[in-house]
Amino acid sequence: MFSKHKFNNKQRELSVINKFWIGFILYTLGYILSVIINLNPFIRVTFQSFGLLIIILNAINLIHFNFDNIYLKITAIIYYLWLSSVVIRGFLLEKEFIKIMIFDPFEGLFVYFVPLIVIFSKNIYYYKKMFETISALCVSFIIFCLFFFTTLINRDISDLSAQAALEYSSKSLSISSGFLLLTYIYHSNKRKFLAFFAIALTLMFSIIKARRGLVFMAGFPLIMLVIFHFLNYRKGYSNRLSLILIIIILFVTTYFYIGTIQPANYGVFSSIVDRTDEDTRSEVVQYFYDDMSTTDWVIGKGINGQYFCPTDEGQMYRNGIESDYLNIILKGGIIRLGLELLILIPAVFKGLFYSKNMLSKASGVWILFYLLCLYPSPNTKFILFYLIVWTSVAICYSKKIRELSDESLIEYFHP
C-alpha cells in the first residue's frame, strides 16, 4: 500500500524516518531556546547544525519523483522551478545573510524546500513519527509555559520580548497539536489530553497577550474538533449527549462570566477587547503598496525582498509583513501565490469530499486552516505547522491513502 522506494528493508526505512524527525526537533528547539533564554550562540549553532545535517541527509533518502496525480506532478514541478528562481534572485554571499538563511526558520532558506515533502515516500511510519514529533514539541511548549508562567500571564502588551517569545514558541511548538486533535480517533487518551492542554494554554496566553492571530489559530482546531466529533463515523447517543453537555456548560459558564464583569473590566479578556478595533496594519500595508512596482507584484523581489517602511527605531526597510499573502507576493510575486493556490485548493476538496478516513479529512481541514491563517499571521515558515501543510497535500492527492478505512489506520497508529 505504501511505497518502499529506495529502502532495502523496513528497519532502514524506519531509521531514516526517525532520524529525519529527530533532526527537525533538534533544529527547532535550538532556535526556540535561543529566542526565549538567549542561548549561547555557539551552543545554538551546534544544536541547529547537527539537526540540519540529520534533516538533509535523511530527507534525500525520503525523496522520490513518482507523483500520485498527474495534475499535481505538473503544477508541483512548475512550482519547484519557480521557488528555485525566488531563492536565486536576491541571494547574497554575505556572512550575516547566510547565517539568517541557515539558522532562522522564520526568515531562512529552508522554507522553500518544505513543498518537497509532497514527493516524500508515502509511508505510514512517516505519519506515525510525525504524530510523535508533534507530541514531543507539545511537551516542550508546556515546559516552556511552566518556566515563564509569570511572564505569560502579565497583561502588559507593551512587553514586546514576551510577545515575541509567545508568538515564536506557539507557532513552532504548540499550534501543530491541533492536527492531533483533528485526528483524535487514532491517538491514545494521554496524547489527546496533551494536545488539548497545549492548545488550551496557547489560547489562554494569546488572549492575555492580545495576540489576535494566535487566538484564531488556537481556536480553529478546537472548533473543528467539535464539528469532527459530530461527523465522526462512530456515532452514538452517549457521545453526542456528552458533547452537547460540554457545549452547554461552556456556554453557560461564558454567559455568567460576561454577566459578572464590569463594562470597563473584561478580566483576562481586557487586553484583547481593548485591541479589537485597533488598526495596526493599514499604514504598513500602504507603505508596502507604495513600494511595489508592477513587476514586483508579478514576480516578487526574490528571497531578500524588502519594502520601504520607516519605523520609530530608525529602520528604513522591512523584509516581511503581517499578512502572509503579501509576504508570499513580496518574495515570489503573484505567480508564486497562484501556483501554491493551484496545488492547495484542489487538495482541500479531495481531502474533505473524496476520502474515506479521518486522516485525509483532517489533512484537508489543515490546508484550509493554513489558507485562512495566511491573512492574519505569517506561517509560511520552516516550522512543523507548515511541514504538516505539505504532508497534508501529499495525503490528499494520494488516492490510495484517501481510500484507506479508519479501522486499518487505527490499527497502524494506536500504540
Image (cartoon, rainbow, N blue to C red):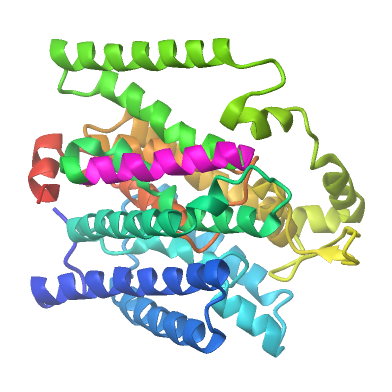
Is 331 or 195 nearer to us in this picture?
A: 195
Q: From what the image shows, is residue 396 above or below residue 139?
A: above
Image height of 200 relative to 303, above or below = above
Residue 164 picture quarter? bottom right
**Does 289 lie within the magenta span?**
no
Horizontal side of 80 relative to 124 (left or right) equals right
Q: Nearer the viewer, residue 258 or 124?
A: 258
Question: As rendered, which of 387 and 250 lies closer to the eye?
Answer: 250
Residue 192 on the magenta span: yes
Quadrant in the rendering for residue 245: top left
Residue in view at x 53 percent, y 71 percent? 37
Residue pictured at 74% horizontal, 57% vertical: 330
- Decide which of 303, 400 is in the foreground and name it: 303
Residue at 40% over, 49% down: 176
Whether residue 27 is visible, yes or no, is yes
Q: How many marks?
A: 0
Q: Position of residue 403 (x, y in %)?
A: 20, 38
* Image position of 5 (left or right of 40): left
Q: Pinpoint residue 336: horizontal percent, then vertical percent.
A: 64, 55
Residue 324, compared with residue 100, is above or below; it is above
Span colored in magenta:
191-212
Residue 318 shown left or right of residue 15 in the figure: right
Q: Is residue 79 above or below residue 254?
A: below
- What secondary structure prevails in the magenta region? helix
In the picture provided, is 12 more to the left or to the right than 26? left
The residue drawn where x is 37% and y is 76% is 55
Q: Residue 350 location, x and y as percent?
A: 36, 35
Residue 372 seen: no
Q: Position of residue 174 (x, y in %)?
A: 42, 51
